Image (cartoon, rainbow, N blue to C red):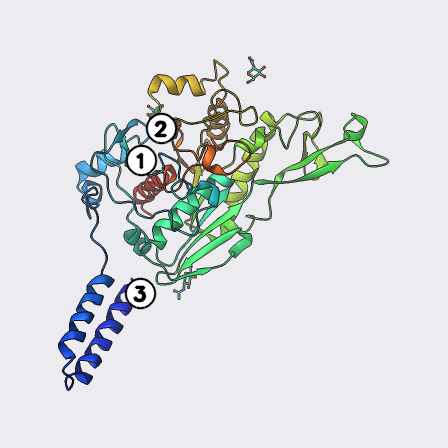
Amino acid sequence: MAAKGTTRRHSFSSSAASTTSSCLAASLCLASLLIIVLLFSAARPTVLPKYYRTAPQFDGRHDSSPARLENRLSCNYSDGAWVLDPDPIAPRYDHTCKEIFKGWNCIANQKTNGRDLLRWRWQPSHCGLARLDPLRFLRRFRNSNIGFVGDSLNRNMFVSLVCMLRSVSSEVRKWRPAGADRGFTFLDYNLTIVYHRTNLLVRYGSWSASDPGGALESLGYKQGYRVDVDVPEHTWADAPGFHHILIFNTGHWWWAPSKFDPVKSPMLFFEKGSPILPPITPEVGIDVALKNMVSYVEKTASIGATKFFRTQSPRHFEGGDWNEGGSCRLKKPLQSNEVEEFFSVEKNATNAEVRVINKHLYKSLQGSSFRILDITRMSEFRADAHPSTTGGKKHEDCMHWCLPGLTDTWNDILMTSLEDAGS
Ligand SMILES: *[C@@H]1O[C@H](CO)[C@@H](O)[C@H](O)[C@H]1NC(C)=O
Ligand SMILES: *[C@@H]1O[C@H](CO)[C@@H](O)[C@H](O)[C@H]1NC(C)=O
Ligand SMILES: *[C@@H]1O[C@H](CO)[C@@H](O)[C@H](O)[C@H]1NC(C)=O
């Protein structure tokens, strides 16, 4: 437990003790003791600015009285509002966390509202949302493996959790278990947190027509992507058996025309090794793929594993889509009426994709043993929380999230859901 801080203080006092004995003879003793005292106080944690209040150690959520539990279990964490905290709680990590991908580090990249992001707190309408307490988390999930499986938005959430935990426990082993893209074991707790990179969950690769040609060639297809709806990508195929807690996502890649252009490089769906005929569209393909992957995970997950599917993360492009000069320069979260303008499916809004994808997810997960981690509604308000022009890309980044930032709150909800699940 928190061995590092303790060790450091230990060695300090023993060296102080030996200094004391050796300098007893010298007349400089008092002066050196004074220096030691000064050094010692400099090594202690600095006092937080008044601006912050400290996080409560315990709050109502950990009260297990029947009334509290009832309130918690019936709470709808999606129903709420962002409030500007006049008296914000100290951040759990900052821009110095090395795991933050450069383009997401809004404070280091001097996004004007980079620090203000931390002052917004999600307030559910009918209950409180406790903050994930990193030490409590490490102790609680000692000896376990937690895997994030999905696209870069799941990596964003993974980084948030790693940074929170590293801020209180820095002894880590960096490695890539079970096909992972990256992972860390917190050595003092034997807790492993891993990211498995996969865009569609299912395996895909480029396809081009060959001689003598089969069914797809005879339909006139020249090139595209072969998408095997029943084969998990190798990057995570072993993850269900390895992890005790899994958090999946997939979504925007299914409608990513820069890669899967419907004409120039369409998705060509295969099942049991043969093309699905007549060819199906991505709208149908995603359902078939999800159905297969859900049942793959149910079959291969370790006994007692807790499986989450995270709902879709919203994008906030205004004045055009991502490749049409769309931007997200707002400094405050959206109001409810503005949210509808951004996401309305009926109005064919630029960012309506998020709600379309969620319909597919909810349909495919129905009747499964997955729990749904619903972060969509709360995130729809946060047009202010993307890297925007500070993302360092050719196009403005209105898709990923600044870190520290919104995905810290996703992890708060994850922690809450794990406690409710009794994990
Ligand atoms: C939770 O609240 C959201 C937002 O108000 C609403 O759309 C959703 O239907 C609610 N879910 C349940 C299970 O009541
Ligand atoms: C560390 O955790 C893993 C499970 O995640 C377990 O198999 C292993 O035995 C643990 N190691 C120790 C030393 O407890
Ligand atoms: C929706 O908007 C896109 C451009 O953003 C356009 O290409 C498409 O035709 C529109 N669809 C409908 C049904 O209006």
Give the residue pinned by disc 2: 331
Tell me the kind of residue under disc 1: Asp
Residue 72's spot in the image, x, y percent? 25, 36
Specify the quarter for ligand 2: bottom left
Using a 10 Å C-alpha cutoff, classify the residue at mark 1 as few (fewer than 14 neighbours), some (14 to 19) or many (20 or more). some
Tell me the kind of residue under disc 3: Lys
The label on residue 4 is 3
| Residue depicted at x 35% and y 16% | 337
**Left or right: where does residue 112 sit relative to residue 90?**
right
Residue 45 figure quarter: bottom left
Give the residue pinned by disc 1: 116
Using a 10 Å C-alpha cutoff, classify the residue at mark 3 as few (fewer than 14 neighbours), some (14 to 19) or many (20 or more). some
Mark 1 or 3 closer to N-term?
3
Using a 10 Å C-alpha cutoff, classify the residue at mark 2 as few (fewer than 14 neighbours), some (14 to 19) or many (20 or more). some
Does any portion of residue 132 appear in the rendered image? yes
Residue 107's spot in the image, x, y percent? 38, 42
